[in-house]
Amino acid sequence: MPKIAETERLILRLFEPDDVEALYELMSNRQVMKFSVSGPLNRKQVQTFLNSILDTYMSKGFSLWAIHCKEDQRLIGFCGHFFHRLEGQDEVELVYRLLPDYWGQGLASEAARAATQYAFTELGLERLISFIADNNEASKRVAESSGFQLERQTHFYDKPVLVYSLEKSSWGNKE
C-alpha cells in the first residue's frame, strides 16, 4: 500500500486496481454523488474513472488518493488533486469524497489538509482550487477549514459552482 500521507486517523495512499469495488461503493452512492456533475456512476464508469486515476499517476505524477481509515482498515473515500482547464487557465482542484457513514467526524477536513500540505510542500504547487455547489454546506466547511476562501462564482460543465481557492503564499506552512 504505497502511502502518500498519514494523519492521526487516516492514510492517504495510491489507488490500486483492486480498489475498484470499494470505489464503486462510494461512487454509486446517490448521497455521495449528489453534487457531482456526473451523478452516481455504474461499474463500468467507475472502472474507467479508476483507470484514469492510475494513468494520471503515470502522466502527471499525482492524482486522487484512496483514504484508508486506520480504525477499521477500510477504504472510505478519496482525496487529492484533479486537473482542469477553467476559463482558459490550467488549475489543480482539491477533491474529497467520503462514504456517508464517515461524514460529520472531521475526516474529510483531515484528509483535505493533508492533501493541501502535500500539494504545497511535496508537489511544489502554488495554487489549489475547489469547485463547490452553492448549497453544499459540508463541502464549504471542509474547504474553509483547510484555509480556502471563496474566490468567485462560475459555471463548470454548465452548472453554477463556487470556486474556492488557496495560494501557497497565504497558506504558509500550516498543518
Image (tube, grey):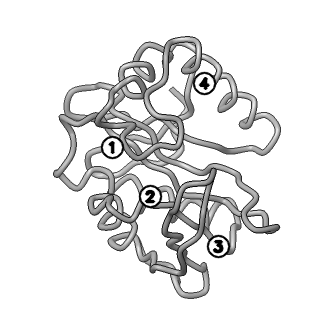
Instruction: Give the residue at x 51% y 65%.
Output: 117
Looking at the image, which residue is at 26% across and 46% down? 9
Q: Mark 1 points at which residue?
A: 10
Is 74 situated left or right of 5 in this image? left
User: Which badge, 2 or 4, comes first in the chain's sequence?
Assistant: 4
Question: 99 above or below 1?
Answer: below
Earlier residue among tags 1 and 4: 1
* Tag of residue 114: 2
Query: What is the C-alpha distance between the residues marked 3 and 4?
Result: 25 Å
Q: Are marks 1 and 3 in contact (CB under 8 Å)?
A: no
Residue 67 position, x and y percent, is 40, 38
Gap between marks 1 and 4 measured at Cα: 21 Å
Which comes before the other along the chain, label 3 or label 2?
2
The type of residue carrying mark 1 is Leu
Q: State left or right for residue 14 relative to residue 145.
A: right
Q: Where is residue 48 in the image (x, y as percent from the top left)?
A: 65, 20
